[in-house]
Amino acid sequence: MDRIIEPILCNGCHACYAICPKRCIDMIQNEEGFLEPSIDKDKCIECNLCTTTCPVNNDLTIDDKNKLISIVAINKDDNIREKSSSGGVFTEIANYILDKNGCVYGAGFNNNFEVEHMKITDKSEIYKLQGSKYVQSKIGKIFLEVEKDLKKNKFVLFTGTPCQIEGLKSYLGKDYEKLYTQDIICHGVPSPKAWKKYIGEFKGNIKDISFRDKTFGWNKFSMKVESDNSTYLNTLDKDTFLQSFLKNFNLRNSCYNCRFKKLNRVSDITLADFWGIENIDKKYFDDKGTSLVILQSYKGQNLYQQIKNKFISKEINLEDAIKYNTAINKSVELNKKRNIFFKNIDRYKYDDLVQKSIKETNIEKIIKINQRIKGKIKRILG
Ligand SMILES: Cc1cc2nc3c(=O)[nH]c(=O)nc-3n(C[C@H](O)[C@H](O)[C@H](O)COP(=O)(O)OP(=O)(O)OC[C@H]3O[C@@H](n4cnc5c(N)ncnc54)[C@H](O)[C@@H]3O)c2cc1C
């Protein structure tokens, strides 16, 4: 086997890595910093399990489907909302599973503030998974661990991006009654290499990071990096990591044509920010964080029934709910300057890298001026 999938389509979900019976697939960082499968051809037995398990090659069937139910929700506990990116729904789903002696899987920071999937089994650890980390999370051997827990008949909550959920389900290959999955509406995932560069430029030991600090309000994206002796806090208009994320410079190639963005998902629950809620029902907007919850399956519906007393919430029709959140089923546009960003990633400091990528290069400017002059001359000459 030479290749599982075209690199431009690979979302790095690790399903191929986990399924390989010969352990001959490694996940290697490409030059942009994203993990991609690499096959040791000497060990490969051509069983094709990697290609047939890849969720990009596969359309998973969605059974247990009910009509989608969309809900606006605000956690009644303001402390939870403060630590969460949106309205703090994830925390209550996690609490529900942990109350059943289950395991919760999600994205957290390791000791070097790299983002990776990890397992928690105690409520005292929920803080590790709370809050969005706008970086592609490394799955590693997590799918194997999830399967082990399910085979031990444990309750498991697996949370992640839509492609990670499809990767897991495709790897497992069957339904487990005690498996709950929760995905997000996903803008796209930034490069771990870009992230490493950005945090590497902070002085002192980093103690904590929030990509969605709410000091200036939920509506304003703010990055907070707390070090030994200083705190950095900047909103989107000043923070260059958030700019490179939301201007689509540093996203994985597959995110610009994501096939996992859709209304009907294989997950049980989809979570998101309820953008535009102030135009729909002002009662649910206090700028401290409001969630959009989409119940995808009966299982998701039943789970939400058990936790709904934790929220101020009501049902909203789906069309209104997603009106201001196009990322649910539309990929973001490829930024034409993305190649400038990655070409220069090892050359400049992060702030300069983003500024330079935003600004047109002089050559591009000259070409544009030339084209304008040529157009004018053509018009004058008829
Ligand atoms: C990369 C990314 C892009 C997103 N894009 C959008 C968007 O375009 N529109 C929108 O409305 N919402 C988006 N979200 C979702 C939103 O930011 C919140 O994560 C979501 O609403 C849950 O909020 P909460 O308050 O319930 O819980 P929180 O405590 O804020 O969320 C924690 C949950 O997020 C998961 N998580 C955190 N970081 C990652 C990661 N890197 N990869 C996978 N899972 C992660 C954790 O595993 C946990 O399940 C995005 C999130 C991420 C991580």
Image (spheres, rainbow, N blue to C red):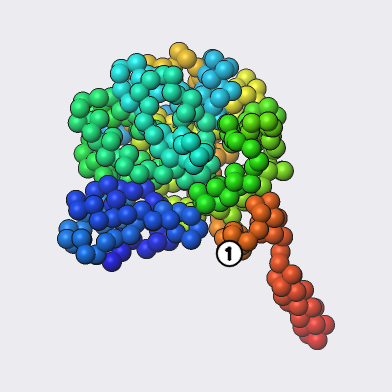
Instruction: Give coordinates of residue 162: x percent, y percent.
Output: 40, 42
As drawn, 165 above or below 193: above
Instruction: Give coordinates of residue 207: x percent, y percent.
Output: 58, 31
Identify the residue at the far right of this view. Answer: 380
Instruction: Give coordinates of residue 137: x percent, y percent.
Output: 44, 43
User: Which image quadrant for residue 37?
Assistant: bottom left
Q: Which residue is pictured at 55% across the width and 47% down the height?
A: 195
Q: Which residue is pictured at 52% across the width and 35% down the height?
A: 132
Q: Quadrant of the N terminus?
A: bottom left
Q: Quadrant of the C terminus?
A: bottom right
Q: Which residue is pictured at 30% across the width and 17% down the height?
A: 100
Q: Which residue is pictured at 58% across the width and 50% down the height?
A: 197
| Label 1 packing within 10 angstroms: few (<14), some (14-19), many (20+) | some
What kind of element bears circle 1? helix
Identify the residue at the far top of this view. Answer: 309
Instruction: Give coordinates of residue 235: x percent, y percent.
Output: 69, 38
Residue 249 seen by the camera: yes
Q: Is mark 1 within 8 Å of ligand 1?
A: no
Towards the viewer: 184 or 236: 236
Residue 176 seen by the camera: no
The residue identified by callout 1 is 343
Q: Amino acid at mark 1?
A: Lys
Identify the residue at the far bottom of this view. Answer: 381
